[in-house]
Amino acid sequence: MANVSPITSVRSKIEERKPADPVPAGIVKPDVPEPVAKILNQLLRELTAAQVPIQSVDAHAIEMAARCMDTIRQAEEISSDPKTEPGTRLGAMRLGSRAGRDLQKWLEMIGATPGSRARLGIRTAAPKPMGVLERLLAARLKQ
Protein backbone atom coordinates (compact mmCIF):
# COMPACT_ATOMS: atom_id res chain seq x y z
CA MET A 1 0.00 0.00 0.00
CA ALA A 2 1.35 3.40 -0.96
CA ASN A 3 2.22 5.79 1.81
CA VAL A 4 0.42 9.06 0.99
CA SER A 5 0.80 12.03 3.28
CA PRO A 6 -2.36 13.88 4.31
CA ILE A 7 -1.04 17.11 2.78
CA THR A 8 -0.77 15.53 -0.66
CA SER A 9 -4.20 13.95 -0.46
CA VAL A 10 -5.84 17.20 0.72
CA ARG A 11 -4.08 19.17 -2.00
CA SER A 12 -5.18 16.68 -4.63
CA LYS A 13 -8.79 16.96 -3.45
CA ILE A 14 -8.57 20.75 -3.64
CA GLU A 15 -7.07 20.56 -7.14
CA GLU A 16 -9.93 18.32 -8.27
CA ARG A 17 -12.41 21.07 -7.37
CA LYS A 18 -10.76 23.67 -9.59
CA PRO A 19 -12.37 24.01 -13.02
CA ALA A 20 -10.05 22.95 -15.83
CA ASP A 21 -11.33 25.63 -18.19
CA PRO A 22 -12.39 29.09 -16.96
CA VAL A 23 -14.78 29.58 -19.87
CA PRO A 24 -18.40 29.86 -18.73
CA ALA A 25 -21.04 27.78 -20.50
CA GLY A 26 -22.11 29.21 -23.85
CA ILE A 27 -18.89 31.17 -24.44
CA VAL A 28 -16.88 30.22 -27.51
CA LYS A 29 -13.19 30.95 -27.00
CA PRO A 30 -11.75 32.71 -30.03
CA ASP A 31 -8.74 31.31 -31.85
CA VAL A 32 -5.95 33.58 -30.61
CA PRO A 33 -2.15 33.31 -30.22
CA GLU A 34 -0.88 31.61 -27.03
CA PRO A 35 0.11 34.81 -25.12
CA VAL A 36 -3.31 36.33 -25.79
CA ALA A 37 -5.02 33.04 -24.82
CA LYS A 38 -3.30 33.09 -21.42
CA ILE A 39 -4.44 36.66 -20.80
CA LEU A 40 -7.94 35.78 -22.04
CA ASN A 41 -8.19 32.84 -19.62
CA GLN A 42 -7.01 35.05 -16.75
CA LEU A 43 -9.59 37.71 -17.63
CA LEU A 44 -12.35 35.10 -17.76
CA ARG A 45 -11.33 33.71 -14.36
CA GLU A 46 -11.26 37.18 -12.81
CA LEU A 47 -14.56 38.26 -14.35
CA THR A 48 -16.23 35.05 -13.20
CA ALA A 49 -14.80 35.49 -9.70
CA ALA A 50 -16.13 39.07 -9.65
CA GLN A 51 -19.57 37.68 -10.54
CA VAL A 52 -19.74 39.62 -13.81
CA PRO A 53 -22.50 38.09 -15.97
CA ILE A 54 -20.81 36.96 -19.18
CA GLN A 55 -22.79 36.25 -22.33
CA SER A 56 -21.56 34.67 -25.56
CA VAL A 57 -21.49 38.06 -27.31
CA ASP A 58 -19.04 39.33 -24.66
CA ALA A 59 -16.30 37.03 -25.95
CA HIS A 60 -15.32 39.58 -28.58
CA ALA A 61 -14.92 42.43 -26.10
CA ILE A 62 -12.97 40.22 -23.70
CA GLU A 63 -10.73 39.12 -26.58
CA MET A 64 -10.05 42.76 -27.50
CA ALA A 65 -9.12 43.55 -23.90
CA ALA A 66 -6.73 40.59 -23.91
CA ARG A 67 -5.21 41.74 -27.21
CA CYS A 68 -4.68 45.24 -25.79
CA MET A 69 -2.93 43.77 -22.75
CA ASP A 70 -0.68 41.71 -25.01
CA THR A 71 0.10 44.76 -27.16
CA ILE A 72 1.12 46.68 -24.04
CA ARG A 73 3.35 43.78 -22.98
CA GLN A 74 5.02 43.67 -26.40
CA ALA A 75 5.49 47.45 -26.48
CA GLU A 76 7.12 47.37 -23.04
CA GLU A 77 9.50 44.61 -24.18
CA ILE A 78 10.52 46.59 -27.26
CA SER A 79 10.93 49.91 -25.45
CA SER A 80 12.93 48.39 -22.59
CA ASP A 81 15.39 46.60 -24.89
CA PRO A 82 18.68 48.59 -24.87
CA LYS A 83 19.42 47.50 -28.46
CA THR A 84 16.22 49.14 -29.79
CA GLU A 85 16.77 52.22 -31.93
CA PRO A 86 15.30 55.49 -30.56
CA GLY A 87 12.71 55.79 -33.36
CA THR A 88 11.50 52.24 -32.82
CA ARG A 89 11.44 52.77 -29.05
CA LEU A 90 9.33 55.92 -29.48
CA GLY A 91 6.92 54.06 -31.78
CA ALA A 92 6.59 51.23 -29.26
CA MET A 93 5.93 53.71 -26.46
CA ARG A 94 3.21 55.40 -28.53
CA LEU A 95 1.66 52.05 -29.39
CA GLY A 96 1.70 51.02 -25.73
CA SER A 97 0.10 54.30 -24.72
CA ARG A 98 -2.65 53.95 -27.32
CA ALA A 99 -3.26 50.33 -26.32
CA GLY A 100 -3.49 51.44 -22.67
CA ARG A 101 -6.22 53.94 -23.49
CA ASP A 102 -8.07 51.35 -25.54
CA LEU A 103 -7.66 48.79 -22.76
CA GLN A 104 -9.27 51.12 -20.23
CA LYS A 105 -12.31 51.48 -22.50
CA TRP A 106 -12.57 47.72 -23.08
CA LEU A 107 -12.26 46.99 -19.35
CA GLU A 108 -15.08 49.46 -18.68
CA MET A 109 -17.24 47.74 -21.29
CA ILE A 110 -16.76 44.22 -19.95
CA GLY A 111 -17.28 45.10 -16.28
CA ALA A 112 -13.67 44.65 -15.27
CA THR A 113 -13.40 47.86 -13.23
CA PRO A 114 -15.04 48.69 -9.89
CA GLY A 115 -16.92 51.62 -11.45
CA SER A 116 -18.33 49.57 -14.30
CA ARG A 117 -19.44 46.82 -11.92
CA ALA A 118 -21.14 49.42 -9.75
CA ARG A 119 -23.00 50.78 -12.79
CA LEU A 120 -24.05 47.23 -13.68
CA GLY A 121 -25.31 46.72 -10.14
CA ILE A 122 -22.96 43.83 -9.41
CA ARG A 123 -22.33 43.37 -5.72
CA THR A 124 -19.25 41.45 -4.84
CA ALA A 125 -19.89 38.87 -2.17
CA ALA A 126 -17.99 39.32 1.05
CA PRO A 127 -15.64 36.40 1.67
CA LYS A 128 -17.07 33.85 4.04
CA PRO A 129 -15.14 33.38 7.27
CA MET A 130 -13.15 30.18 7.26
CA GLY A 131 -14.42 27.30 9.32
CA VAL A 132 -12.34 25.41 11.85
CA LEU A 133 -11.34 22.68 9.37
CA GLU A 134 -10.42 25.22 6.66
CA ARG A 135 -8.22 27.17 9.10
CA LEU A 136 -6.45 23.97 10.17
CA LEU A 137 -5.84 22.94 6.56
CA ALA A 138 -4.62 26.41 5.60
CA ALA A 139 -2.23 26.47 8.54
CA ARG A 140 -0.93 23.02 7.67
CA LEU A 141 -0.39 23.91 4.00
CA LYS A 142 1.62 27.01 4.99
CA GLN A 143 4.11 24.90 6.96
Image: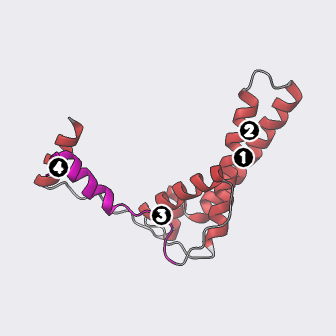
Q: Position of residue 85 (x, y in %)?
A: 86, 25
Crowding at dot 3, Cα within 10 Å, few <14 / some 14-19 / many 20+, comes out as some
Amino acid type shown at disc 2: Ala
Amino acid type shown at disc 3: Pro
Residue 22 disc label: 3
Residue depth check, mark 2 versus mark 4: number of the one nearer the observer: 4
Labels 1 & 4 near each other (Cβ < 8 A): no
Q: Position of residue 72 (x, y in %)?
A: 69, 43
Q: Position of residue 96 (x, y in %)?
A: 74, 41
Cα distance, mark 4 to mark 3? Answer: 33 Å
Cα distance, mark 2 to mark 3? Answer: 27 Å
Work out whether mark 3 precedes mark 1 in sequence or the reverse, and give the earlier one: 3
Q: Which residue is mark 4?
A: 2
Work out whether mark 4 precedes mark 3 in sequence or the reverse, and give the earlier one: 4
Secondary structure under the numbered disc 4 in the rendered image: loop
In the rendered image of this protein, does residue 123 appear above or below residue 104?
Answer: below
Q: Which residue is mark 1?
A: 71
Q: Residue at x 52, y 61 (%)?
A: 44
Q: Residue at x 52, y 67 (%)?
A: 119
Magenta-drawn stretch contains 38 = no
Labels 1 & 2 near each other (Cβ < 8 A): yes
Amino acid type shown at disc 4: Ala
State the residue lying farthest toward the right. 87
Secondary structure under the numbered disc 3 in the rendered image: loop
Could one spot residue 119 in this view of the protein?
Answer: yes
Cα distance, mark 2 to mark 4? Answer: 51 Å
How are the residues colored?
A: secondary structure
Q: Which residue is mark 2?
A: 75
Cα distance, mark 1 to mark 4? Answer: 49 Å
State the residue lying farthest toward the top. 82
